[in-house]
Amino acid sequence: MMTNRARSIRAGAALVGAGRETPARVGAAAVAVVLALAGCTGAGAGAAGGNGPSPSTATEPGGTVTPASPGSGTVTTPGTPRVRTTIEGLQLPWSTVFLPDGTAVISERDSALLKSVRNGTISSIGEVPGVVPGGEGGLMGLALSPGFASDRFLYVYFTAAEDNRIARLRIEDAGTGGGLRLGDPQVIFSGISKASTHNGGRIRFGPDGYLYVGTGDSQRREQPQDRNALGGKILRLTRDGKPAPGNPFPNNPVYSLGHRNVQGLAWDSEGRLWASEFGPEVNDELNLIQAGGNYGWPDVTGAPGREGFIDAKVVWPSTAESSPSGLEIVGNMAFLGALRGQRIWSVPLEGENAGTPVAHFTRQYGRIRNVLLAPNGELWALTNNQNPDSVLILSLSG
């Protein structure tokens, strides 16, 4: 029997197309953006535009939606993002965190280096040992300990020789010479299957203080529906890497299942978890995550309204205009970096539903790997495959 949540999804979203017939299984149950090509996360072409600010960039509607009732509470809506400045000199940056003093720490996937950015200057902190880059694997997600002021722990998700794993290491001031230095890593969680693609990699501490982990199916399609496998999941862990108390399955790190390749995690103003996810050649997704929820892969993608599975809140029918990677929520607006789509998507959130996606900076800055809110209220976006890559610092003021 269809859940109340599935009914609300189907009632609150409408799939649209423009000169393109989508697969029948997509149905009329999702918000949509109409696209053209296929893909996973392979290396795309560079940007068509330059690297300078683009304050007059027009936005592009990505689809239409029948709005659902907005959630409780009033949240300020950010203005249209505008590039204030860029910082160049990175190679395949993947994730960013901000230290209490405002210093940004950025992971580079293939070099296994952690870089710091302070006052517009990039410096190397050090290489994370044990990283074995290859394909989409390498040094990926970063998360700062909720107790960083006392424990100084930085958590890292990386591809090792045999698996994907999570380690924590201390990040300390280097002394009178300035800069930062890394302590020895301590692996707290391992055994996440690896492959040349679909390695997941996003980690983030939630409002509850537990570590959430997005994994991929690592080309093993049997894993996402197996609650005892780690691939194709969102995991929820303690700071020591144990299954978090209150997880939906006893003594199990799995928080939700049926995912293909989770790339972004963020919480809205009401504490609801949202996740971005790569589809195959069709149906990239923005999902509202519930504990124990099954999101359908590989049996379904998108929002077909199939009994037993939870529909996506936003569906981009072709991955050519999205391949959504990092996700951030500011006020009642979700921002997603797009890899193949080479743009940033903004999606208004309306309670448990999502509004019409709008594209920004289309093909101006290349592939966008991640977006993150900085302490000063600006949005940092990481480009990929620009050689060198950049940080785009975006103003969200009206």
Image (cartoon, rainbow, N blue to C red):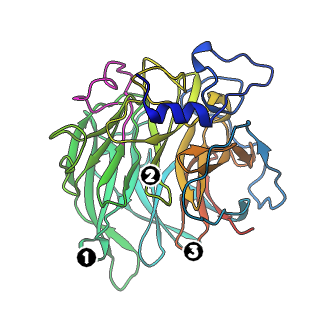
- The percent coordinates of residue 124 (x first, y second) are 44, 64
Residue 25 visible in the picture:
yes
- Judging from the image, what secondary structure is the residue with disc 3 in? loop
The three-letter amino acid code for the residue at tag 2 is Arg
First in sequence, mark 1 or 2: give its number: 1
First in sequence, mark 3 or 1: give its number: 1
The quadrant of the picture occupied by the C terminus is: bottom right
CA separation in Å, label 3 and label 1:
23 Å
The quadrant of the picture occupied by the N terminus is: top left
Q: Nearer the viewer, residue 137 or 35?
A: 35
- Looking at the image, is 381 positioned above or below residue 125? above
Camera-side mark, 1 or 2: 2
Magenta residues, start to end: 214-231
- Evaluate if marks 1 and 2 touch, with contact meaning CB atoms under 8 Å apart: no
- The percent coordinates of residue 189 (x first, y second) are 21, 45
Taking the spot 33% from the left edge, 53% from the top edge, the residue there is: 156
Count up the numbered dots: 3
Taking the spot 47% from the left edge, 20% from the top edge, the residue there is: 306
Q: Left or right: where does residue 250 sit relative to residue 89?
A: left
Query: For mark 1, what is the residue?
Result: 150
- Looking at the image, is 182 positioned above or below residue 236? below
Q: Chief secondary structure of the magenta span?
A: loop
Query: For mark 3, what is the residue?
Result: 376
CA separation in Å, label 3 and label 2:
23 Å
Residue 384 visible in the picture:
no
The three-letter amino acid code for the residue at tag 1 is Ser
Q: Residue furthest bottom?
A: 176
Q: Which mark is residue 272?
A: 2
Label 3 CA crowd tier, 10 Å (few <14, some 14–19, many 20+):
few
- Judging from the image, what secondary structure is the residue with disc 2 in? loop
The three-letter amino acid code for the residue at tag 3 is Asn
